Image (cartoon, rainbow, N blue to C red):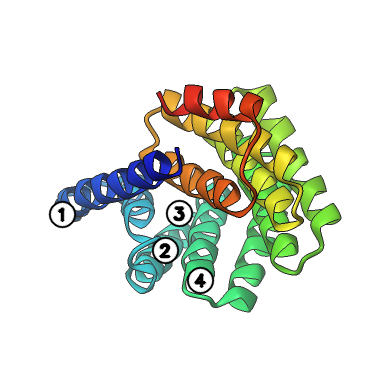
Amino acid sequence: MKKIILFLFIFLTGLCFGQNLALVQDLEEQLKNAQSDSDEIFVLAKLHQALYLNSPAKALEVANQSLSVSKKTGNKKFIADALTQMGDAQWVAGKNSEAVINYEEALKIYEEIKYIPGLCISYRNQGKILNNKSDFSKALEYFFKGLKLAEESGNKYEISKCNSWIGTCFKMQGLYTSALQYLTKAAEIAKSINNNEELGKNYLNIGHIMSEKGIGENQKDTLLYSVK
């Protein structure tokens, strides 16, 4: 079982990398042909998403470009989105203190304009910051706030992400039964929306737990079902 999950993670990671390379090239072409500021911002957001995990420095350049164009439009939602993108790239690059500043600024804007998808992301990011500081109780509060909003709005991508982070938070505390519950749910939802990147991350976390502590028969049945 451990080997199956490891294989699936490696396979999905390789698949995502190949897909992202082609996607980046296509988006760079689309960017050249953007007809309006909103079109440019839309393409830049997709380009950032394709870049930030593997090329955070390039993704930060893209996010900065998006912030510049967004400020020109005066659209607060666009500005908050760009700040969030900057924070994501900085976080992956290990520039956590810089990421926190941008995440918190984005949260203030999303709260001001009451933009629910942005609030889901911002609450998750606040939880991520606290989780990194080992303030697990407060981190879980934010993860569950994000999850509640995501479930109420039917945002499956964010439901998967929040479940994944809740599972990761429990895993870091050694609460493996709870961790497996949320990681398995995250993996199932990621699979249902063809999010191979998130699916691979959850398989890896599940594999780590299995490697560390092993699992019981009931949990094994659940996990086997999730990877079919």
Q: Is residue 214 above or below residue 139?
A: above
Real-space Cα separation, disc 2 to disc 1, in angstroms? 17 Å
User: Quick one: SS at disc 4?
Assistant: helix
Can you give x and y, in whole percent of width and height, for residue 155 in the image? 56, 28
Q: Quadrant of the C terminus?
A: top left
User: Quick one: SS at disc 3?
Assistant: helix
Identify which residue is drawn at 48% across, 67% down.
92
Can you give x and y, in whole percent of width and height, for residue 125 in the image? 65, 55
User: Quick one: SS at disc 1?
Assistant: helix
Question: How crowded is the residue under tag 4: few (<14 C-alpha within 10 Å), some, or many (20+)?
Answer: many
Q: Is residue 146 above or below residue 86?
A: above
Question: How crowded is the residue under tag 1: few (<14 C-alpha within 10 Å), some, or many (20+)?
Answer: few
Residue type pointed to by label 4: Gln
Residue type pointed to by label 3: Thr
Give the mark nearer the N terminus: 1 vs 4: 1
Real-space Cα separation, disc 3 to disc 2, in angstroms? 15 Å
Question: Which is nearer the eye, 170 or 97?
Answer: 170
Q: Label 4 belongs to which residue?
A: 90
Q: Label 1 belongs to which residue?
A: 25
Question: Based on the displayed image, in which of its 4 quarters is residue 5 positioned?
Answer: top left
Q: On the picture, is 154 further left or further right than 2? A: right
Can you give x and y, in whole percent of width and height, for residue 20 in the image? 25, 50
Residue 73 badge: 3
